[in-house]
Amino acid sequence: MFEKRPLNPTRQAVLENGIEEGYAALLQRVISQAKSKTCNIYTLVIDGTHGADFQALLKHLIPYAADHGFRFAAVDTYSYLKSGTELRDQFRQNITDNRAFGYVAEQKVDEYFRSGAQRRYAEYAAKLKEETSEQSLLVIFGPGALWLADGCCDASLFLDVSREYQEIAYKGSLLNFGFSWNIDAVEKYKIAYFVEWPLMEGYRKERMESFDWYVDMNDPSHPVLLTVSDLLAVIRDIARFPLRVKPFLMPGVWGGQYLKKITDLPADMINCAWNFEPIAPENSVLVSNGEQVVEIPFLLVMAFSHLDMIGARNVKLFGDYFPVRFDFLDTMDGDNLSCQVHPKQSYIRENFNEFMEQQESYYIMEKQGDAKVYLGLTETCTEESFREAVEQSQETGEPIRFTEYVQEWTSEKGDLYLIPTGTVHCSGKNNFVLEISATTWWFTFKIYDYVRKDLDGKLRPINIDFAFDNIDFSRKTGWVQENLIPHPKLLKQQGRNEEYMLGERDDLLFYVNRIHLTDRWEDETDDEFVLLNLVEGERVRIISLDDEDVYVEFGYAESYIIPASFGAFAIVNLRSKPCKLIKSGVSKKWNVSLVDADA
């Protein structure tokens, strides 16, 4: 059975305080430390990610503090923010008028706050200390609380939630941080992607080591607490062993039913279009220490252990950014994806301030019926005729025969389609696709979407101008067949086991190999991370060759990251049926550093 909550155990980390669960443990920690202080006012910062349930903690903290003899006073960061109107105006160049795309912000967290916010808070705190003689607890809570207090506090907590948690909340009533209104969930995601996450996740990374405690609030009724020093010890431990992120499964307008079946999703879920595993910024990691489990954003793992995770060469190329993603696209009993194209590096940097271009590939894990993949342009397609057709469809609401312009290919299980930027493409219905791609995922310029509405009932955003700025009209049938639909090439054998090169190009930062596993395959990271997904077969085990007591097991359609620091390992087939695994990482041919300013 597909494991939707994979646990990554700590193996060598020695934790000073361990992982604690529940409000009782959290409150006891805070108040016992407060009572040990001799000052009359104990200042507690409760900072955290937007969407974390600060009120749930305060509801428990206020009576607990009173029961232990503390007078309670509170300051919320929201009172010091600029107005929603001011924030919209301030970030207007980042938000833009486009429904889906903005410009990635580079400002700092202080841009959310009114001028003089820190001074006004300091004046309030000083006045409170002058006027208060009884034992008191002053709490500053909300995103940016440590910044507002200018680091001046007796203790500090950081309440964190995953992006998955936030995105579910954004589909409900949660507004973007500091904003007084949003148009819809698409705008919320856009503002989060281009403004909120760059600023607030950057703040979290920069300030994390300044906090005393880290609190996982993904279940507001049951917080999980550990000291930041223990958090860092946990991260440094798990980053040296095979790691699986928590899958992020979502429905979509074209979604199918296969993922629902193999992952045992609820029957009343309309479909499942995507599984991110991993798309590094979107996923979190579940870490177990004994019986306790804490959920940590994968971004924090990369922030503090990127050298162990991806290796020295890749750090020089990508910094602390995990550069390759695996995700599933399920159109089995679903529908076609939109006809689309992705922007080139110079375009994505100049127009959106995005770090990395969106290179992709499709590996066909399963198919049914006469399934198709659409890749490249027909030999008769011209820029003028294609653009005229899609613009007319957009204006009139009438569908077009897009296969007059986009080349159709019959998909087969085990096929790989390479999709460098500028290549028109989409998966047709009745495919189960493993995407092996550069990590960037949002920059899909839809050219044509069959005049259909999204799950929210609104027409999906079409980006004809952006798309035609990037389409490479030389990529037509013959060129695509020769250059983007490769044939497997045997690389090496070990007994009855083989490794094939499926795809690699100079303009793709990743490679795609396939291991045909009968019994046992031995390999080595060579200080480069390796991504593995079991695309055929039942169950395999990854074993460290340095210590065969160190291993993980996983099943069909599950993915593991083998960190660069893991070294030599073996993959063992645990069942009688032969297996196939997709293996990927950064191509040895790729030498373009994206952390260079001129990249």
Image (spheres, rainbow, N blue to C red):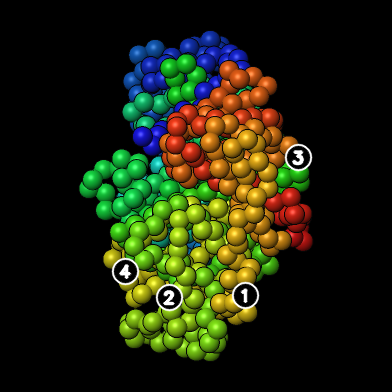
Report how far apart the C-alphas of labels 2 and 4 lie in the structure: 12 Å
Residue name at image x 50 percent, y 19 percent: 289
Q: Secondary structure at mark 1?
A: helix
Q: Position of residue 140 (x, y in %)?
A: 49, 32
For disc 2, the neighbor class at 10 Å (few under 14, some 14 to 19, many from 20) is many
Q: Position of residue 377 (x, y in %)?
A: 53, 78
N-terminal of the two: label 2 or label 1? Answer: 2
- Locate residue 379 relative to residue 595 in the image: left or right: left
Residue 483 lies in what quarter of the image? Answer: bottom right
Vertical relation: 56 (above or below) 84: above
Q: Please say if the residues under marks 2 and 1 sit with CB atoms less than 8 Å apart.
A: no
In front of the other: 78 or 579: 579
Report how far apart the C-alphas of labels 3 and 4 lie in the structure: 45 Å
Residue name at image x 26 percent, y 49 percent: 269
Amino acid type, residue under disc 3 in the picture = Ala
Q: Secondary structure at mark 3?
A: helix
> Which residue in the structure is indicated by mark 3?
312
N-terminal of the two: label 2 or label 4? Answer: 2
Q: Which mark is residue 448?
A: 2
Q: Secondary structure at mark 4?
A: loop
> Which residue in the structure is indicated by mark 4?
453
Tell us which disc is closer to us: 1 or 3. 1
For disc 3, the neighbor class at 10 Å (few under 14, some 14 to 19, many from 20) is some
For disc 4, the neighbor class at 10 Å (few under 14, some 14 to 19, many from 20) is few
Q: Please say if the residues under marks 1 and 4 sit with CB atoms less than 8 Å apart.
A: no
For disc 1, the neighbor class at 10 Å (few under 14, some 14 to 19, many from 20) is some
Residue name at image x 55 percent, y 83 percent: 379
In front of the other: 429 or 32: 429
Vertical relation: 100 (above or below) 266: below
Q: Which mark is residue 479?
A: 1
Q: Please say if the residues under marks 2 and 3 sit with CB atoms less than 8 Å apart.
A: no
Report how far apart the C-alphas of labels 2 and 3 lie in the structure: 41 Å
